[in-house]
Structure formats: structure tokens, C-alpha cells
Image (cartoon, grey):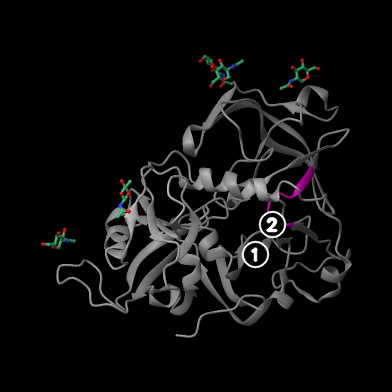
Amino acid sequence: MKQTKPITLSFVLLWVLLSIFSTLAIPTRDSNTFAVPLGVPNAKKSPNPPSYAILPVKTPAVPVGTPPKIVYLQVDTGSGSTIVLPPYNSSLSRTAKKEPANDTTLPFLGGLKISGHYVRDVFRIGSITIRDHKFLAGTNVSQEAPGNGILGLGIRTQIPDGETIGAPLLGIQLVKGGGGQILFGGIDYSKIIGSITYEKQSVEDQWIIPIKLAFTFGVELPKNSSIESNRPIESSALIDSGSTVVYVDNGLADAFYQTIPGYNISTDGYYTIPCDVEVSTLPVVKVIINNQEFPIPRADLVFEPTQNDPKQCVGGIQGGQPNPQLWILGDTFMQNYYLIFDRGEGQIGVAKRSDVKYDDH
Ligand SMILES: *[C@@H]1O[C@H](CO)[C@@H](O)[C@H](O)[C@H]1NC(C)=O
Ligand SMILES: *[C@@H]1O[C@H](CO)[C@@H](O)[C@H](O)[C@H]1NC(C)=O
Ligand SMILES: *[C@@H]1O[C@H](CO)[C@@H](O)[C@H](O)[C@H]1NC(C)=O
Ligand SMILES: *[C@@H]1O[C@H](CO)[C@@H](O)[C@H](O)[C@H]1NC(C)=O
Ligand SMILES: *[C@@H]1O[C@H](CO)[C@@H](O)[C@H](O)[C@H]1NC(C)=O
């Protein structure tokens, strides 16, 4: 999750999305999903067949503690910490062990602050039981928080441990508007078309990889524009299921929106596009990973209407990243591709999805 940045979009929009997903039922093992052959490229040979876990990707229900309390957590590949809020209460769990640290406060976007203490307790991810998993048991929340906390899937979180499951990797299929699955320990090839492109992470302990962004504009750009059609710009990006859109630096976002007729900046600082824009007139945005192109469908550049002006929609690309060398690829990108977070090899894999319709260019 994008923490304490000038733009509060991630959390605000996240909250909107969560209200849609709050009706999620407790996940069950889906026998159809288990029937497909699951690839386990790095699996160790083991006398016991590997066990897998599949969770719905948005706010899965996770039993925590003894007796188990069900909490609905936001899956967050950008967060190294897991946070669990009430109804979990560590004082009421027989298996909870309080860590010998002082209470901690973690700041988030939109002014949200969660304080509490670190504990270790039993965590269940689908069919996997993780004993003594360390997380922040949040007891005081400054404002309404997303769901019952965050399932941090940053590299150091050890959820789940590679020894417990098939391979130390996660396969994530995030579906636009909700749904999708996260597979712990394998790759669900039934969700993929074509080959997988891998790129090594560029920052240790974070799901950050080198990427390029390239734009194809249907309009002529101003002479002094800092961007050009089809000239890729290099940077790195955090692949972050805890962010709703794509965040770049302000300079790039500004140059991008200069090319969109009717763009505006909302009172709370987001770039907006007229909701009724003819989508085919929008620029083509391509994420380039290891020389392969992964376009973002143009419809995804137009997100939800703003609160103050229902005719203007929040754009799927926003500024606000202080460092031009670190962007964030949130749901706007992730909902169009299958992502493999491969802890064992220190790399991220990206593949086209069988359930996504891509634009013709
Ligand atoms: C807790 O806070 C006190 C006072 O700030 C400090 O002296 C102590 O070292 C802290 N303990 C831990 C375990 O961090
Ligand atoms: C947890 O349970 C204890 C014991 O019933 C209670 O005193 C405490 O207020 C509860 N904490 C929260 C955050 O609800
Ligand atoms: C809980 O958080 C609020 C707002 O951040 C703060 O005013 C209050 O003192 C906190 N309460 C406790 C018990 O820490
Ligand atoms: C380009 O020039 C126009 C008009 O002179 C100016 O308004 C705009 O801010 C300039 N843009 C950049 C990126 O320098
Ligand atoms: C742009 O947004 C501002 C509020 O941020 C508003 O006052 C202004 O009327 C908008 N401009 C257009 C052309 O919609």
C-alpha cells in the first residue's frame, strides 16, 4: 500500500472498492480451480505432495487465532506488514504471543493511522496453517479502515513460507471490478495465454522491477512537451495490489494529461478526464517489461467519477510519486495481466490473461 504520500487517492478509492467487496462470502476451496494442472516451476522434490492455497484476491476471509476469528484483509503486495484489526482481539486468542516491543503506529494514505502491538498467532491461508505468524494487532484506528486490515505480501512477510507449499511464489489474477484469485505456491496456467515474461526485482525485499512506459498519441504534442510518441521512459515500479491506479511522477503525469482534451485537476488533486470521453481517442499506454509490451486497455484510463463533479472521472494514471525513478503499478495495470511474485528467484513474471480483452492497436 502506498503510504503517506501527498495524494490520497489510493486509500480513498480503495475504500470505495472495499464497500463493493464487503459482501464477499467466506472462501471455499474451489474444486474446479484445483482440477487444473498447476505449474510449480521451483518446487522442491518432496515425499509429501505439495499443498496449495487459493484465496479470492480482494479482501479474502482469513481465520486468525484460537478460537479462529475471521477477518477480511486487503491483499497488498506493496506492504511488508500484515495488520489485523477487530474482531480479532489478541487478548481473547489462546495462541497469541505478544512481542516484546512497544506499541507501534503505522501511518497510511488519507491520514489513516493504525496503532497496536506486534503479536504472533496462528494464521490460515486456505489450506495452509502458519503458526506464530507475526503481525500488528491494531487496537486503535484513527478513522474507518479498509476491511479488517492488510494481508502484507511484500517479500519479507513469509506468507506463506516456501517450505510449506509447492514453490515460494504467488500467482495473482486480479479481476476488474472485483474477484480473481491468488494462488499461494504455484502458477495457474489456465488463466494465462502465451508465454510469461520475467524480470528480476531491482530493489531487494520489495516487489520493484525495472520497467519502461511508452505512449502513442493520436494528437500532435506541443513542441515543448517533455514526452514524445513511442519514446519509452525508463524507471522502476512497485507492483502493488494495494494501490488502485498507476502512479508516476508529477512531471510525467502533467505532460500526459496535457494531451487529453477536457482534462482537469480535481479539488483534491487528482487528474480527471471527462467520463464521456471517446475512449479510442485516448493515448495508448504500454508498460514495457524485459522488452515485452503490456498495454493498458484505454477504457482503464477512465476510472470512477469524482465526488464533486460526476461528469469528470478520476484518471487511471496519477502523479504524486516524488521520485521519477519509482512509479507504482496498481490495479489499473494488475487487473489486465497474470502476475507471478517469485520470491525464490527474486523476480516477477507477467503474462496475458485468458479472461481479459485487449485493445487492437
Ligand atoms: C520502549 O520504549 C521505551 C521508551 O521510549 C524505550 O526505552 C524501550 O527501549 C522501548 N522498548 C522496546 C522493546 O522497543
Ligand atoms: C479485547 O478483549 C479484552 C478482554 O475482554 C478487552 O478488555 C479489550 O478491550 C478488547 N480489545 C479490543 C480492541 O476490543
Ligand atoms: C486512539 O487514536 C486517537 C486518534 O489518533 C487518539 O486521539 C487516542 O488517544 C488513541 N487512543 C488510545 C487509547 O491510544
Ligand atoms: C509549453 O509552452 C506553453 C506555452 O508557452 C506553456 O503554457 C507550457 O507550460 C509549456 N510546457 C512545458 C512542459 O514547458
Ligand atoms: C476544473 O476543476 C476546478 C476545481 O478543481 C473547477 O473549479 C473548474 O470549473 C474545472 N474546470 C472545468 C473546465 O471543468
**Is 54 on the left-hand or right-hand side of 272?**
right
**Residue 215 located within the stretch drawn in magenta:** no
Q: Quadrant of residue 151?
A: top right
Residue stretch rendered in magenta on the structure: 56-62
10 Å neighbourhood of mark 1: few (<14), some, or many (≥20)?
some
Verify CB contact (< 8 Å) between mark 1 and mark 2: yes
Above or below, 77 against 274 in this view is above
Residue 306 location, x and y as percent? 46, 50
Q: Quadrant of residue 140?
A: top right
Q: Quadrant of the C terminus?
A: bottom left
Residue nearest the viewer, comparing 94 with 327 = 327
Q: Is residue 1 visible?
A: no
Q: Is residue 131 visible?
A: yes
The residue beneath circle 1 is 175
Q: Quadrant of residue 342?
A: bottom right
Residue nearest the viewer, comparing 153 with 150 = 150
Instruction: Tally the marks.
Output: 2
Above or below, 260 against 206 in this view is below
Residue plotted at (82% across, 75% down): 36
Amino acid, disc 1: Val
Displayed-image quarter of ligand 1: top right
Distance (Cα) linking label 1 and label 2: 8 Å
Mark nearer the N terminus (1 vs 2): 2
Asked which secondary structure carries label 1, the reply is loop
Residue 1 location, x and y as percent? 53, 46
Amino acid, disc 2: Val
The residue beneath circle 2 is 57
Asked which secondary structure carries label 2, the reply is loop
Residue 271 location, x and y as percent? 37, 54
Residue plotted at (38% across, 42% down): 268
**Is 189 on the left-hand or right-hand side of 297?**
right
**Residue 57 located within the stretch drawn in magenta:** yes
